[in-house]
Image (cartoon, rainbow, N blue to C red):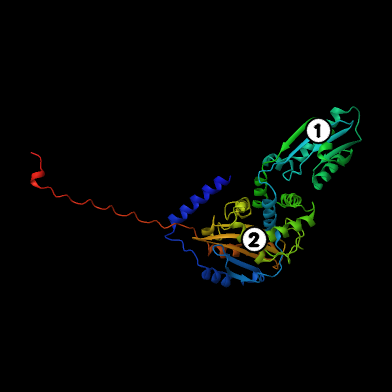
Amino acid sequence: MKRNVGLFCSALLLLTFLNHDSANALEPNSVASVFSRYIENKYLANPSVVVIDQQDGAVVYEKGANSLRKPASIQKLFTGAAAVMHLPMDQVFSTSLWVGTEPKSLVIQGSYDPWMSTDSKLAIKMGRTSLPRFEFNSLKALKDANSGSIKSFNLYYSSLFTSDIEHIKKFFRMKGITVKMKRVSMETALNFSDTRILGSQSPELEEILDYALTWSDNTLSERIARLASVAAGNTFDQAGVADTFSSVLQELGIDSSRLIFKDASGLSKENRVTANIVGQLLVKIKSDDRFAPLINALPVSGISGTLRNRFTETAPDAVGLVKAKTGTLSDTTNLAGYVESGDREYAFVIISDRHVKTYSVASRIRDLVDRILGKIAAPFFPSVQPEPEPTPEPEIEITSSEIPL
């Protein structure tokens, strides 16, 4: 899929080259002028903004860049950074269902699979672990292994997320069966397992992270952040996630003392970040090869994820030239990422979290932000050096005595 996006981008840039005589890249002063001219629009409602030249880390433009604002889903940038720093990108997660060694018992050997889905249709479409499939097979296995009616049973499990446990309880409650969920260690789960019923394995974590960021999946983001928290030596809860986010920033040389982290997805309106710190993070991760999985997962303007329907009409020249994370709440419309401008690239953060709570206003803001970036975006075409003209061979004078008879 990434290869197809890359081919599409290449074709798009070639078409742009063929249809335009030249693409004018903007120098930092010109970029600042563009933002100064348009950022005061009333619909943006006094946004917090920073633009940084990726080349030298210099701030090109800023407006209220140190004020604490609601990040919405650009919070997921911290989740991605924490995952890359603390988790192996090739990690996979296995889950299996077993008939237990005890009468009327089942065992789920889990591994905190973030890819598990409570939506069976989505699971089938995406090749994800389907929790409903596990539940229905659990019910069938109970009936096959135990004669007579089943009013209650024990389910021993290891390494399942709380929301998955609650989903299992609800499933059996609706079937009129009481399930006694008993958390055990992996070793105990293995000892209590008799006959394997089914199992599943997730794709590699890099693919899961890619989906979480490209489509701004809240559940995946929360789960990945908790896994990163434990790997970092912190607790498996929101307090641990907050500590992990802070330590990630500190390790990158970014002061996080003023920030407030209430979740990993950005859904909480109590989260607080500054455009300046998010901008610093964008600059740091772009220059560090470790974070390639995070950079590659960002939606691309007019092509993928949450940006697939943007820029195509508002700023068509910017299609394929902006990679950014969106962030949306009822009063918040944010965008943070990178815009290419010829041989330069700018990291930008635009946080508009004080606007009127209507869809039409949010739509106007998205269009305005697209147009601002469209005035900066320009493809990079390396200059073609003309081929040197061939040096003529020296003429050789032949005397009459040298001519053969």
Q: CA distance from mark 2 to mark 1?
A: 45 Å
Element carrying mark 2: helix
Give the class, few, some or many, for how many residues have Cα within 10 Å of label 1's Cα (few <14, many ≥20).
Answer: many
* Residue drawn at the location 50% of the way across and 52% of the way down: 12
Residue matched to label 1: 98
Q: Earlier in the sequence, mark 2 or mark 1?
A: 1
Say whether residue 179 is left or right of residue 161: right
Residue 393 in sight in this render: yes
Where residue 367 appears, as percent x and y from the top left, is: 60, 62
Where residue 157 appears, as percent x and y from the top left, is: 83, 40
Give the class, few, some or many, for how many residues have Cα within 10 Å of label 2's Cα (few <14, many ≥20).
Answer: many
* Residue drawn at the location 68% of the way across and 61% of the way down: 359
Residue 263 in sight in this render: no
CB under 8 Å between callouts 2 and 1? no
Image mark for residue 118: none
Foreground of the two, 207 or 134? 207
Quarter of the image for the C terminus: give it: top left
Q: Amino acid at mark 1?
A: Trp
Element carrying mark 1: strand
Quarter of the image for the N terminus: give it: top right
Q: Quadrant of residue 171?
A: top right
Q: Amino acid at mark 2?
A: Leu
* Residue drawn at the location 70% of the way across and 51% of the way down: 86
> Which residue is most to the front?
401
